[in-house]
Amino acid sequence: MAITYNDLYLDVRQQLRDIGVEAATLEARELVCFGLGKSREELSRDSRLYAATAQERRVRELVSRRMAGEPVAYLTGEWEFYGLPLDVTPEVLIPRSDTEVLAEQAIAYVRKLGECRVLDLCAGSGCIGLAVADKAPDVKVVLGELSDGALKLCRQNIRRNGLSGRAVPVQVDALGLPDPTLGPFQCIVSNPPYIPSGDIGGLDGSVRDYEPHAALDGGPDGLDFYRSICERWRNVLLPGGRLYFEVGIGQADSVLRIMHRHGFGDVQIVDDLGGIPRVVFGTLCTEI
């Protein structure tokens, strides 16, 4: 029996709600648009039109995969972050709205500086660094990432958002020593792997079974990358420059102490919209 675009959307939304998907409205819209080959505007405009059998079948197949646990962003191959459309594959973590707090904090800081250089370390899809480049046009951004697959996505997302003149991807290892010629930077932002190794098996299946473990695993206590970045990467940060981190639940105080130990002062903690400490940042002192 034929079904309209709108009824198909409502049906998909209810299916997702029935399995406890919090963002059922958003996810249903993305799946239906992708399956139908329609933009959001076209879906709204053509809501009373009937879906062709092949279109409905494609949407139903996507929904079945989503209900089995596969994330929407990997099904559609894209996601939005801070207003930017980004290509996304299982090579990188899916950008989260919580991470926009980190981008927002860094953007506010570098806008005050004017012309400066920013390093997005553990860049993944490039979402944070590209948001900074987009919202602070006087800034030059380096997207530092180890994974070849992630670097490919960084390049795609730079081109997709017209930021070729202001952002460049570079292969680096956040657990290693930086090449001194990479710097200097006035600001480093990082959303590093921070899940304790032993906790990965207990994550939600949509994360555990689909997202890259290398981008999740922060070592035995989840803090390996924070230690390395504070100790080693401070060498490419100018004195008086700032280091911004995203942190996991319950990690803010530990990261604050790590930053203090490695010469960062005026360390502050910022909550996300849910009241959870999400960002820790500090200023590199001239002396430890």
Image (cartoon, rainbow, N blue to C red):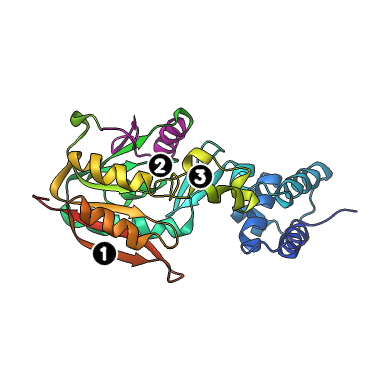
* Left or right side of 2 for 146: left
Residue at the spot 84% in from the left edge and 45% down from the top edge = 53
- Image point (74%, 63%), residue name: 10
Q: What is the C-alpha distance between the residues marked 1 and 3?
A: 26 Å
Q: Which mark is residue 268?
A: 1
**Sequence order check: which comes first, mark 2 or mark 1?**
2
Q: Nearer the viewer, residue 120 or 141?
A: 120
Return the disc, 2 or 3, that comes first in the chain's sequence.
Answer: 3
Secondary structure beneath label 1? strand
Q: Nearer the viewer, mark 2 or mark 1?
A: 1
Look at mark 3 in the image and give the residue it sits on. Answer: 93
Judging from the image, what secondary structure is the residue with disc 3 in?
loop
Q: Quadrant of residue 20?
A: bottom right
Give the residue type that dot 1 points to. Answer: Gln
Amino acid, disc 3: Leu
Per the model, the C-alpha gap separating discs 2 and 1 is 24 Å
Q: Which of pointers 1 and 3 lies earlier in the amino acid sequence?
A: 3
The residue indicated by pointer 2 is: 126
Tell me the magenta residue range: 150-177
Q: Is residue 244 visible?
A: yes
- Amino acid type, residue under disc 2 in the picture: Gly
The x and y percentages for residue 82 are 42, 55
Image marks 2 and 1: residues in contact by CB distance under 8 Å: no
